[in-house]
Image: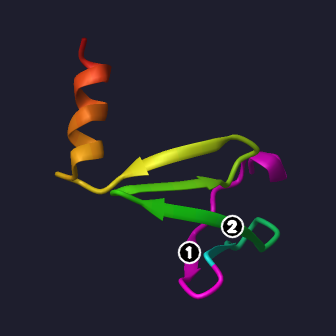
Amino acid sequence: MLPLSMEKPTAFTINKQKNTIELTGQNIASRTEEYSFKDGVFSVDISGVKHDYYLKDSEAYKKALKTIWI
């Protein structure tokens, strides 16, 4: 079993009205975090560090791929 801080959520629920994501799992404490979604980029802090996730084939996705492979 991983320490609580390293457990991974097994499900999530997005509330578009409140811009929140609720993370749930069997071995983690449920929690709710705010997120943003703009121009194909979903940004959320689910681990203590904010990360960006890209909508596949969006302009932001294509730009991010170019910067990764340079």
Q: Quadrant of residue 62?
A: top left
Q: Secondary structure at mark 1?
A: strand
List the residue tagged with mark 1: 11
Q: Which residue is mark 2?
A: 34
Q: Secondary structure at mark 2?
A: strand
The answer to whether 39 is drawn above or below residue 52 in the figure is below
Percent from the top left, x then y, of residue 56?
23, 54
Q: Earlier in the sequence, mark 2 or mark 1?
A: 1
Q: Is residue 9 above or below residue 57?
A: below
Quarter holding residue 38? bottom left
Instruction: Specify the amino acid type for callout 1.
Output: Ala
The Cα–Cα distance between marks 2 and 1, rounded to whole angstroms, is 16 Å
- Residue 63 in picture, x, y percent from top left: 25, 34
Q: Residue at x 76, y 44 (%)?
A: 48
Q: Give the image location of residue 28, x and y in percent.
A: 77, 65
Res. 62 mark:
none
- Crowding near the residue tagged with mark 2, few <14, some 14–19, many ≥20 C-alpha atoms within 10 Å: some
> Which residue is at the far top?
70
Write the residue at 65% across / 75% down. Answer: 20
* Residue located at (25% from left, 31% from top): 65
Closer mark to the observer between disc 2 and disc 1: 2
Give yes or no for residue 64 being in the magenta stretch.
no
